[in-house]
Amino acid sequence: MDNVLSKRETVRIDKLVSHYEENIEQFVRFMGYVQALFDNTEALAPYVHSKKWRVKDPDHLRDKLKRIASKRRSQNEQFDITKDNLFEKVTDLVGFRILHLHTTQIDRINRIILKLLEQENYVLIEGPIARTWDTESTAYFKSISIETTDTGRMYTSVHYLFKANKRALPTCELQVRTLAEEVWGEVDHMINYPHPTHISTCREQLRVLARVTSSCSRLVDSIFSSYQEATVEPTFRQDGKRSSKDKVR
């Protein structure tokens, strides 16, 4: 079936984008609140390498809506996004990303995020959900009670979706991933997203890069594990039995 959009569909999408542009100040303000929320949380500081954020560009929203409409048409489904439900259907208009160094930090980061959202009365719509293609990563996330899903893309990232309150329009998609995984994500985003590259060698190289960055994350995990073991020295309790004491905290 021909997936080229009709003039009527194109006009409808243009109106949806205009509706977003008319309300974009709300999303910019919300982005500022989210940024301040995570910037001013001292408990996160020891675990966070860096943070990134953005409000979706209107042209990027237009492109996304065209892809959704085209996909619905190919599946003989109705394109049901309207002005009334646009901000419910498209939930990544505000995006925030937290980058950290090694995998086991996510356990503590997740606990802090959930506690912070609860304390500040944010509404957690979805998450945490770990999107991963890696079986070892899947096992780890399950061990710390984080739900997992395989989206078919070769990266690992923990996702949350939240909003300020039940009546607020903007939602924020929060992603937490290792710095190594971010390398693959940035490269893939540049040449393979949102439109997959037709260059077969690039697709194969991206698959290789995904495995390399996954291995890099494991190597970093191993380095920190070795470091922590090396910074623990044996001591003896008063009863003479061996115990251990951290040399570095």
Image (tube, helix red, strand yellow):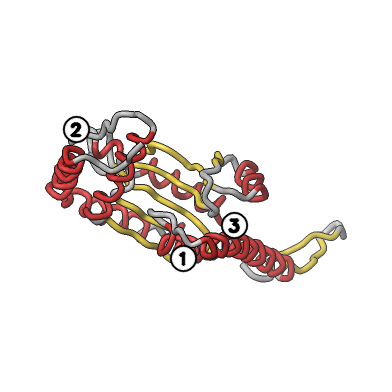
Q: Which residue is mark 3?
A: 103
**Left or right of 152 on screen, residue 170:** left
Rounded to the nearest whole Å, what is the CA distance between mark 3 and mark 2?
A: 40 Å
What SS does tag 3 mark? Answer: loop
Question: For mark 1, what is the residue?
Answer: 187
User: Do the residues bearing badges 3 and 2 touch, measured as CB atoms within 8 Å?
Assistant: no
Q: Residue at x 33, y 45 (%)?
A: 67
The amino acid at mark 3 is Thr
Tell me the mark number nearer the camera, choosing from 1 and 2.
1
Above or below 150: residue 199: below
Q: Residues within 10 Å of mark 3 (few under 14, many from 20)?
A: some
- What type is the residue that disc 1 sits on? Val
> Residue 45: horizontal and vertical position, in percent?
45, 63
Q: Nearer the viewer, mark 3 or mark 1?
A: 1
In the rendered view, tell whether residue 225 sits above or below residue 61: below
Q: In the image, what residue occupies the spot 65% across and 63% down?
A: 215
Quarter of the figure with residue 141:
top right
Question: Is residue 121 among the parts visible in the rendering?
Answer: no
* Label 3 – label 1 distance at C-alpha: 21 Å
At label 1, counting other C-alpha atoms closer than 10 Å, the crowd grade (few under 14, some 14-19, many 20 or more) is few
Asked if the residues shown at circle 3 and circle 1 are in contact, with their CB atoms under 8 angstroms apart, the answer is: no
Indicate left or right for 176 with 220 as reference. Answer: left
Q: Nearer the viewer, residue 182 or 3?
A: 3
Image x and y of residue 96, in percent: 36, 55
Q: In which quadrant is the C terminus drawn? A: bottom right
